[in-house]
Image (cartoon, coloured by chain):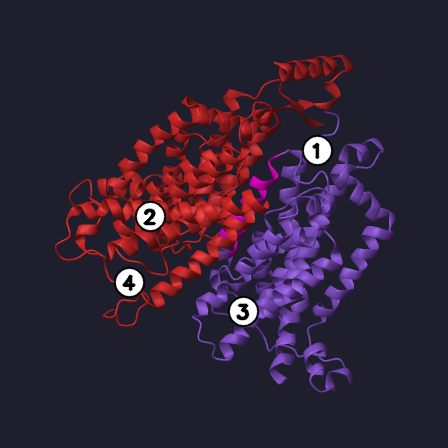
Chain colours: A purple, B red
Amino acid sequence: MEALALLLGATLNAGTVIAIAALGLLINERSGIVNLGAEGMMLVAAIAGFATSVNTGSDWLGFAAGAGAGAAMAFAFGVLVIWLNTNQYATGLALSLFGVGFSAFAGVPYTQQKLSERPQFAIPYLSDVPLLGPALFKQHPLVYFTVLLTLALMWFLYRSRAGLVLRAVGESPSSAHALGYPVRQIRLAAVMAGGALCGLAGAYISLVYTPLWVEGMIAGKGWIALALTTFATWRPARVLAGAYLFGGVTMLQFHLQGQGVQVPSQFLTMLPYLATIVVLVLISRNANFIRANMPASIGKPFFPGS
Amino acid sequence: MLKLEARPQPSRVMSIASPVLALIITIVIGTVLFAALGKDPLGGMYLLFVEPVRTPYALSELALKATPLLLIALGLSMCFRSNVWNIGAEGQFIIGAICAGGVAMQAGPDTGRWIVVPVLLAAVLGGMLWAAIAALLRDRFNASEILVTLMLVYVADMFLSYLVYGPWKDPAGYNFPQTISFLPSTQTPRLFMGLRVDVGALIALVLVGAFWLLIFRTYAGFQLQVGGLAPAAARYAGFSSRRMLWTALLMSGAMAGLAGGLEAAGPLGQLTPTVPAGYGFAAIIVAFVGRLHPVGAIFSAVLMSMFYIGGELAQSRLGVPKALTGVFQGLLLFTLLACDTLVHYRLGWRHARTRASHAIGTVAVVKSKEA
């Protein structure tokens, strides 16, 4: 039981990383734009957050730096894709490749650095509950923020006027344009919001999840988050549930290794990637299910007045 | 205010000029970066563009690194032309190297030089097989090939790691994660005495011709291009999009696998966890900078190889981190995509555009679409 409670706690922690990034990408894709640069934005944000925290001693400034770095990269991507009509896939890939290179370059002086003493968080009283208390209520504040973010996003998308406009832009940019909405500016805002959240997730990885900086430390989590938005058919609650599922799979491998399971560790490390493929296949199998939920203009450029 | 206007036809001049323009912008940014790091920018540019072509040895090293990039980029060019997004060439490269290594390790003391052929064939098949997984999942279950090929990179990487830490570890290797060194008979033949460049460079050049023929002079290549540019037209013409998907992925997988095999049986000579050197990802940039054209890929592969070698030189001589290479590569693709806008659009002044000229422009666009 003790071990299971620990696993639950670790799952929430690992799921949060993917959830924040995937929720950001969801906003971004709801506006009709796919940003394959998630991995790169998260890497740059991870080093930006880490470096800021090392130099200022403040994790919160680190998170802000991470979110800022993500938003800045997303801005560059957005200008290219929205105003210069470049291919979204190619541009996103370029952002990822640049992020891999730039983070490795900028991170060289930080590879041996240590962060200040990691703060411990606990919700009074609740965290004293046996078994579940430590698992559920001794998490980093961002874990709870993610749950709130999901709820807020659900309200935003389905209950607010601004959310309706965002969805309209994603479904039919030309109709939204005809109604007088500034389609390009809305798309840029959505892309930058996505970048900021990917950045926050990246900073969470280097400050909380594995508090250190290693080259390439995002290890495909950006790509998994991208896949997750598709599995979750662009719905916030499903994104959160899916992210915890992936967190569980990721943590299960450490758990199994700890239990001394006789499988080479490399095969256990493959698990999250294989799980991504399996779920992708299961969900994509039904093309109509995906298509019914997919923002109709996704991946297609929009050039007003043409 | 500056505004983009659609060109009636894509500009041929710009499609050649755009990579050059992108390179210039990248160099300018690079110069600024060197200066910001307190290094001599001219010295940096010298290392990047002059040093790699100064001596026969340097040229051989340049060709050695350009070879895998060119091979992979040839496959990817065809793949991207058909609008199939194989971005996991790195994984196919790793599996190619593993398969080549597996065959190479079967060689005994009296195995003849013929063993090189099965070594490379195994690599090709391995790469194809790895890409075939993505093709199958896309074909049967509609699973995005972008995500599947990419996830398979991590899986291939872990599989390599398992082999070199586990069953294939050299028993006499002081517990280092590496296989035995392959016997000299399995080594790909070198072209010149004392230089490392090997037959792979020749194979790559021959394949440039083969791909040029395939893409521009065969019916299959034509179908592939139509499918990529205008899927609706391809469907109307009765071209099979499934066959296109399989062809594109299998060919690009085969090329990445071959590159991996040549690397394992050539300069590496054994398998280690550092087999994946990022060529599979860099080749994506090579393919785009080379205009998805086999001949263009030669130039861009050499350029990208210069970045690799220049990065290493900058590290050893100027103390600039080698990771600078990745920054340059990413920047180049990013600026290229921005410059490519000028292939399809031209810059104009908004207030200069009258209603009449707009109408003429529209007519021109409609006509060019009809044509």
Q: Name the residue type under label 3.
A: Leu
User: Where is mark 1, residue-wise?
Assistant: A302
User: Where is mark 2, residue-wise?
Assistant: B123
How crowded pointer 2 is (Cα within 10 Å; few <14, some 14-19, many 20+) is rated as many
Give the CA separation, mark 1 to mark 3. 41 Å
Give the CA separation, mark 2 to mark 1. 43 Å
Q: Name the residue type under label 4.
A: Thr
Q: How many marks overall?
A: 4
Element at label 4 = loop
Which one is in front, B44 or B349? B349
Which one is in front, B69 or A258? A258
Give the CA separation, mark 4 to mark 1. 52 Å
Q: Name the residue type under label 1.
A: Phe
**Viewed as shown, does residue B341 lie left or right of B324?**
right
How crowded pointer 3 is (Cα within 10 Å; few <14, some 14-19, many 20+) is rated as some
Q: Provide residue B92's location: percent of width, then percent of height.
A: 41, 49
Work out whether disc 2 and disc 1 sit on a shared chain.
Answer: no
Q: Provide residue A224's location: percent of width, then percent of height.
A: 59, 56
Q: Which mark is residue A84?
A: none
User: Where is mark 3, residue-wise?
Assistant: A212
